[in-house]
Each structure stands twice: as structure tokens, then as C-alpha cells.
Image (cartoon, grey):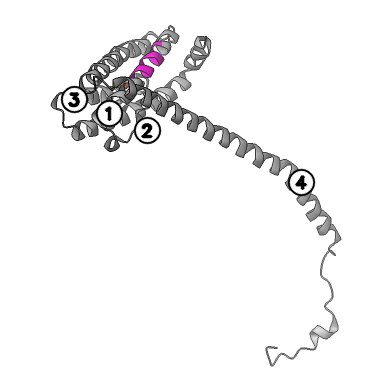
Amino acid sequence: MLAPIHRWIWRDRERRVQKLLRFGETETDGGRDLLRAAEVTSDPLLRRLFLLHATDEQRHGAPDIGAERLAPAGHGLDDLRVEEESDDTMLAFLHLSEKSAASRFTVYRDALGADPDTQGVFTAILHDEMFHMNYTLTQLLRVAPKRHRSHLWRARLSRLWKAYLRLASAIAGVLGGLLLMIQYFVLLPAFAWIAKRAAAREPIGWSAVPPERNEASLRRQY
Ligand SMILES: [Fe+2]
Ligand SMILES: [Fe+2]
């Protein structure tokens, strides 16, 4: 349903570069978090997989030839506190992030019919994201065979809550801007009018000082 909007966003070269640059940043950030996750985990297999995953994300975020070759992201890995996660909660979170990234990249890839080069980049990245999505679920099933469903639900709710917070702060920003604009156009003109009226009542040029003020002695201060 949103395909025409995505096509419109990706059509403009400048918008495309802006979007890719932001994506690149998120990917590199996600790569850093995964490196930390590899340090923190005590599970040797997970460490290996996290390292592999981190290398993928670093590669997605790093410039290849030029700005246009910057690879995209959008996992939402950026709001992750690695130290507070255990292996199972980390895997649940990663699985959902990678899943949403994979579905978004599919949309982007389809919207980029007019730019086969960038489309190729998306296709390659999508392949990696599918792998990330699948290994995180397989590993979650291994480390938490009984509780994987509840972990996934908790991760889903936490993503929903974060999305709500992002939306709420965006709305607050818009409302704040609106209020300032109303103040600027409604309150300020009234004060400007009062100030102008007061200025018009002021006499123009030098005005004579009353004689009693000239009687003060110059020998003392008061
Ligand atoms: Fe990625
Ligand atoms: Fe990924």
C-alpha cells in the first residue's frame, strides 16, 4: 500500500543519499553493539555468531566506493543496552529487529527499480538480514527452548513501547512548535503595538532638565 510513497522517497537522488547515510550510521552502531554482545556472552557459539553478525553490520554501514554505495540499515539496534540483556532476551530482541529490517529492505529493494545499482546493494544486504533473522531464532530456541515464546512477546511489547515513545515525542515536538508559532503571531504583535504606542508618546529630541536638578553641588557626590 505504501509502495508509491517509498518509490517517491527513493526517486530523488539527494533524499536517497541522505537516507543511505543515516542507514549507514545505524548499521555501524548496530555492529558496535554486537561486538559488545560477543564480549559479554559466555556462550562460545553465540560469541562466534555475534562476531560474524557484527562484521556483517560493519560492512553494511561502511562506504564501499562512494556515498551512493553506502549500505542501508534500520534495525533499531541503536536503542539497545547490551549489558542489561541476557543471551535469550538479546536473541529475542535481535530476531525481531532483523525481521523488521528484512521486511523493510524488501520494500526498499522493490521501490528501487529505477536504480539497479542501489537495488543490487539492497538485495545483497537482504540476504545477510535473512541469515541474521534465522540464526537468532534458531539460537533462541536452543538457549531457551521452553521460554522462547514469552521472550519474543516481551521483546515485541518493548519495541511497541519504544515506538510509542518515539511517536509521542515527535507529536510533542510538533505541538511545541505550533505553540511557539501562535505566540509569535498572536501575542507578540500585541506587545509590539503597545511598545509602538508608548514610543509615539515620548517627546522627540533634547528635553530641558528641571532647574532644581541643576542646583546639586559638584563638590559632593550626593
Ligand atoms: Fe544490516
Ligand atoms: Fe542485520
Using the numbered discs, state the Cα–Cα distance from disc 1 to disc 4 in whole angstroms. 52 Å
Q: Which residue is mark 2?
A: 79
Assess mark 2: CB under 8 A from ligand 2? no
Q: Residue at x 16, y 24 (%)?
A: 48
Assess mark 1: CB under 8 A from ligand 1? no
Within the image, what quadrant is residue 66 found in? Answer: top left
Say the numbered circle drawn on residue 31: 1
In this rendered view, identify the residue nearer to me: 89 or 46: 89
Q: Is residue 48 left or right of residue 218?
A: left
In this rendered view, identify the residue nearer to me: 208 or 190: 190
Of circles 2 and 4, the one toward us is 2
Q: Which residue is mark 3?
A: 46
Q: Which residue is mark 4?
A: 189
Using the numbered discs, state the Cα–Cα distance from disc 3 to disc 1 in whole angstroms. 15 Å
Q: Under tag 3, what secondary structure?
A: helix
Q: Residues within 10 Å of mark 2 (few under 14, many from 20)?
A: few
Q: Sequence-wise, which precedes: disc 1 or disc 4?
A: 1
Q: Main secondary structure of the magenta part?
A: helix
Q: Is residue 53 left or right of residue 78?
A: left
Residue 198 in percent (x, y) is at: 82, 58
Q: Sequence-wise, which precedes: disc 3 or disc 1?
A: 1
Using the numbered discs, state the Cα–Cα distance from disc 4 to disc 3 in whole angstroms. 64 Å
